[in-house]
Image (spheres, rainbow, N blue to C red):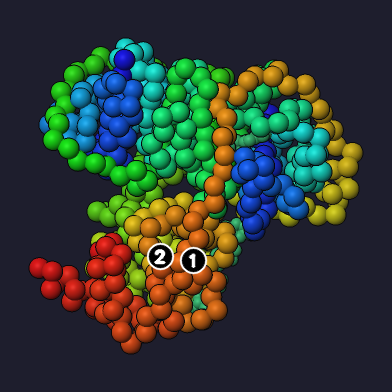
Amino acid sequence: MKFLVCISLVPDTTTKISFVDNDTKFNTDKVQWILNPYDEWYALVRALELKEANGGTVTVVNVGGAANDATIRKALAIGADDAIRIDASGDLDSYAIASEIAAVAKSGGYDLVLLGKETISDNGSNVGGMVAELLDLPFISYASKLDVAGSTATIERDIEGGEEILSVDAPFVISCAKGMAEARIPNMKGIMAAKTKPLNVVTPQGTASLTTTVKYELPPAKSACKMISPDNVGELVQLLHNEAKVI
Amino acid sequence: MAVLFLVEVAAGKVKKASYEAASYAAQVATQLGTEAVGLALGTSDNAELAELGIYGAKKVVHANNADFDSFDAGAWAKAVSDAAASVGAKVVIIPQTLTGKAVAPRVAVRLNAGIISGAVSLPDADFVVKKTAFSGKAFAFMKITSDNKVIAFVPNSVGATKGSGSATVEASDIAPAASKVTVKDVKREGGNVAPLPEAELVVSAGRGMKGPENWGIIEDLANVLGATTACSRPVADVGWRPHHEHVGQTGVAIRPNLYIAIGISGAIQHLAGVNQSKVIVVINKDPEAPFFKAADYGIIGDAFEVVPKLTEAIKAFKASQG
Ligand SMILES: Cc1cc2nc3c(=O)[nH]c(=O)nc-3n(C[C@H](O)[C@H](O)[C@H](O)COP(=O)(O)OP(=O)(O)OC[C@H]3O[C@@H](n4cnc5c(N)ncnc54)[C@H](O)[C@@H]3O)c2cc1C
Ligand SMILES: Nc1ncnc2c1ncn2[C@@H]1O[C@H](COP(=O)(O)O)[C@@H](O)[C@H]1O
């Protein structure tokens, strides 16, 4: 099977978020970029496991500028066979990103397109469904298990308050959540091999975004925490009822 | 013209997030000088759907076709975009439940519409919408530049406002496109309590509980409150709790009215998924636990002593309320 794994770059999970230019731009100064955890831990690793079990190739694709290359190489070090970077920079929205990915996915003839359930920076959960619609393929979202036999996949996905088990024939698009695989740490051999694996840069088709970000805002600072004695939990109950009005 | 919103029905009942969608759509419709129309897919009875009128819907289009009951994102998205075309809706409102998250982006592509997901506010006069970003560490204000617009809002963010209207329910013969997905089994847990993303009250615990055998006191507290239980990531990772209970940056993001965190240190990745809760209570034996900085109310103490006492106090309070 040919697997295409969509990988995005996000600020490291401990990044303190701030903004510049009158709060219209994310302050990227000193930001350490990492692969989006869902893409790396679940989508990529599960694709690699399936390839190791059944054969095939794993290609990773990223839409972004040349500064992303070093981080993309990490996906190659973890085990992807090759990478495609669609050389688009600037603020692209999920539709613009999805359009670029769909074009590459279509020409490459992949059996499975895997994504993370969301980017931890945008939290849009948009790109996967859009790619599926653009390719007119089934979209299985929030999958926590994926098995493939022949060209048929059996998938477990999260639904409200539980799980659903379904089957679907390739090709399809799947977004991956926790449970699907265990994160892998690249070893020395992988890191060395990654240096010579192909990272192909392709020209974007240039689909325009349909949204713009006007400005950003940080949540209001929390007022100081009110401490209550462990011997007087009744006071907490009263505060939750009378002051906070949540019970 | 109309503003269309998606209605979800589970076990014959309209979901709470759909009432909120009705409210949201009704307010957008007022801004635009038009009406809110709901679209319900799958089996449910008309009386139940008519209730959406109380929240501002003028009409609910109902495709009472059991083939919609087993969810397929592609089939649902086609139905939504067909309905948008037939009622002349340029704006579609979708609650960001797990179902909504799969449908909304497909609808956006079908309608050539820009989408704002993670919305936590109504559009302002310029149609700028506030949305969550950076896992709850910030908000972005976004504008849709296309003619058609899709807004996917976070449940519990704008609230369902009750009025006194009523909705007519209109049968529709929209049928699902043939699906390539076969649903084989559905496993639901948790019985009556609200699933995490919709829950108003959440009791959550972490590694401070020492082991899965100690979760009884957490469940007792959740039960007296009618709250849903959650946990920190390491707890789900080692299998003390089911993984769908894991909240945080890499788990479920929630915004309940009340979040009680017990024996959780308050790491930044945990906070990222819960910091939009309206009120946070932290119970931790370590006065230096970072979670206290993000809390509204705190108790420094041993969970094994404090939690049972709190459960009793809430029981007594509920009894006094009758
Ligand atoms: C990329 C990435 C993503 C992550 N995503 C998430 C995520 O989504 N969600 C998440 O939760 N974590 C996430 N983490 C992990 C996170 O960094 C923390 O390690 C984790 O949240 C800690 O869990 P905890 O608070 O239960 O355990 P600990 O940090 O071990 O804290 C236990 C707490 O219990 C207290 N305690 C101990 N005994 C008692 C007692 N008897 N009574 C009261 N209090 C007691 C201790 O004082 C301590 O504060 C992520 C980490 C990374 C690197
Ligand atoms: N710039 C990008 N390049 C490649 N894949 C991306 C990009 N942005 C998002 N994705 C993929 O789409 C998924 C969902 O992203 P989002 O819609 O932003 O939540 C991510 O987990 C990635 O798999």
The numbered disc on residue B67 is none
Question: What residue is rendered at 58% in x and 62% in y?
Answer: B268
The answer to whether one can see residue B229 in this image is no
Label located before the other in sequence (2 or 1): 2
The answer to whether one can see residue A213 in this image is yes
Cα separation, mark 2 vs mark 1, equals 8 Å
The C terminus of chain A - image quarter: bottom left
Indicate the position of residue A149 as horizontal and vertical percent values.
57, 34
Badge 1: few (under 14), some or many (20 or more) residues near its Cα, within 10 Å? Answer: many
Indicate the position of residue A246 as horizontal and vertical percent values.
28, 61
Q: Marks 1 and 2: in contact by CB < 8 Å? A: yes
Of residue B68 and residue A22, the one placed in the foreground of this image is A22
Of residue B73 and residue B6, the one placed in the foreground of this image is B6
Q: Secondary structure at mark 1?
A: helix
Reply above or below: B193 against B187. Answer: below
Q: As drawn, is B228 to the left or to the right of B239?
A: left
Indicate the position of residue B156 as horizontal and vertical percent values.
35, 47
Residue ID for mark 1? B294
Q: As drawn, is A233 to the left or to the right of B138?
A: left
- Could you tell me the amino acid type at mark 2? Ile
Reply above or below: B89 against B126. Answer: above
Task: Name which quarter of the figure residue B46 lies in.
Answer: top left
The numbered disc on residue B280 is 2
